[in-house]
């Protein structure tokens, strides 16, 4: 039901974006883009799928699930495809959970699902870091926003401090678990319990967590580079790179809010408005730019459909062999 709401909400946003000429597909000319440049962008975006697979691989290894990187890459790519082509950003996680459950039928389903939730949490932490850094750079260019930067910086530091306290001080873990159980939010309490288990796991060192964050931050940086390469506007300078970086990171942050179909419409609106504010350029150009980036993401995700078909045929053949 909520996915239907998100789809309707995205449709409404897109309607107004086209109505007020913020988005205008007729102005998109693929001939303006160098073929080899597009291929390089596609390869860059493919590398983000690889990095995301590596992150999940390490998380599963921390919990002593010895899956091959090839298998983790396959289910991650399948998840990536369904994330791009199904309403809601969690569609791919469902398929990844299904394949993990099939691989480990003796383990509790909820426990396996919680590993994917932890993978999401690590990605969110990295996004918060990128977002905070962007706000810092924003203050360099726009001094009147220094107050916003300080507030966000304090919130970020407080968030990580509380996370550290909750992980290290067991009494907080007990209080949260009992409170959520009392509120009949048992499943959420179990997820949080798994998160505590992950961060307090002896195999998970600060070095390991730092590695996971670096992998996640790298995926965002590569995505930003892809958008910079798609921009055929004025000459690319360091000043412009920093500005596009902060615009894109803020857009990613708003795009991750689960109130529309994969952020469709919201991402285009935020990216175009911020770009117009910072670059004082054509708002439609920047909205179209982000839309092109989204289209390329869908193109990059298509091999995930082929992997899904391969996995499905393997299961059919296995079932047929049993009979």
Image: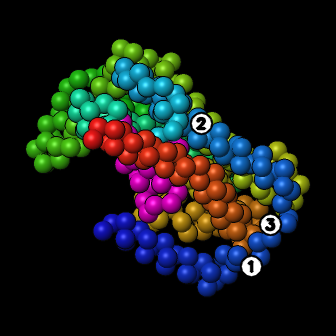
Q: Is residue 190 above or below residue 146?
A: above
Q: Residue at x 59, y 53 (%)?
A: 302
Residue 30, labelled with which disc?
Answer: 3
List the residue tagged with mark 1. 26
Q: Position of residue 180 (x, y in %)?
A: 17, 43
Residue 303, labelled with which disc?
Answer: none
Of callouts 2 and 3, the N-terminal one: 3
- Which residue is situated farthest in the left direction here? 182
For the stretch drawn in magenta, the main secondary structure is: helix
Q: Residue at x 40, y 31 (%)?
A: 161
Q: Position of residue 300 (x, y in %)?
A: 63, 51
Which sits in the foreground, 313 or 179?
313
- Judged left or right of residue 35, residue 110 is left
Secondary structure found at label 3: helix
Q: Position of residue 288 (x, y in %)?
A: 70, 68
* Magenta residues, start to end: 76-100
């Amino acid at each position: 039901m909520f996915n239907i709401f998100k789809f309707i909400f995205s449709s409404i946003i897109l309607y107004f974006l086209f109505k007020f000429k913020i988005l205008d597909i007729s102005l998109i000319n693929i001939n303006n883009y160098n073929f080899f440049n597009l291929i390089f962008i596609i390869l860059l975006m493919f590398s983000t799928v690889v990095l995301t697979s590596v992150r999940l691989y390490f998380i599963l290894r921390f919990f002593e699930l010895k899956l091959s990187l090839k298998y983790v890459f396959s289910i991650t790519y399948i998840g990536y495809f369904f994330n791009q082509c199904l309403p809601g950003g969690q569609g791919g996680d469902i398929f990844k959970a299904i394949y993990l459950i099939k691989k480990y039928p003796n383990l509790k389903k909820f426990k396996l699902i919680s590993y994917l939730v932890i993978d999401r949490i690590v990605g969110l932490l990295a996004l918060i870091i990128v977002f905070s850094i962007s706000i810092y750079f924003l203050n360099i260019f726009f001094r009147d926003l220094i107050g916003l930067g300080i507030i966000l910086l304090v919130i970020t530091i407080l968030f990580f401090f509380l996370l550290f306290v909750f992980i290290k001080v067991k009494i907080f873990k007990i209080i949260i678990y009992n409170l959520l159980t009392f509120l009949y939010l048992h499943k959420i309490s179990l997820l949080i319990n798994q998160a505590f288990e992950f961060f307090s796991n002896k195999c998970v060192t600060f070095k390991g967590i730092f590695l996971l964050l670096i992998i996640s931050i790298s995926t965002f940086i590569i995505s930003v580079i892809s958008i910079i390469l798609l921009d055929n506007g004025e000459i690319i300078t360091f000043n412009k790179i920093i500005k596009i970086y902060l615009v894109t990171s803020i857009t990613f942050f708003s795009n991750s809010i689960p109130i529309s179909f994969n952020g469709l419409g919201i991402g285009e609106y935020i990216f175009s408005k911020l770009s117009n504010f910072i670059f004082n350029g054509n708002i439609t150009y920047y909205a179209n730019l982000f839309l092109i980036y989204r289209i390329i993401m869908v193109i990059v995700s298509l091999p995930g459909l082929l992997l899904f078909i391969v996995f499905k045929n393997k299961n059919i053949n296995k079932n047929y062999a049993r009979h």
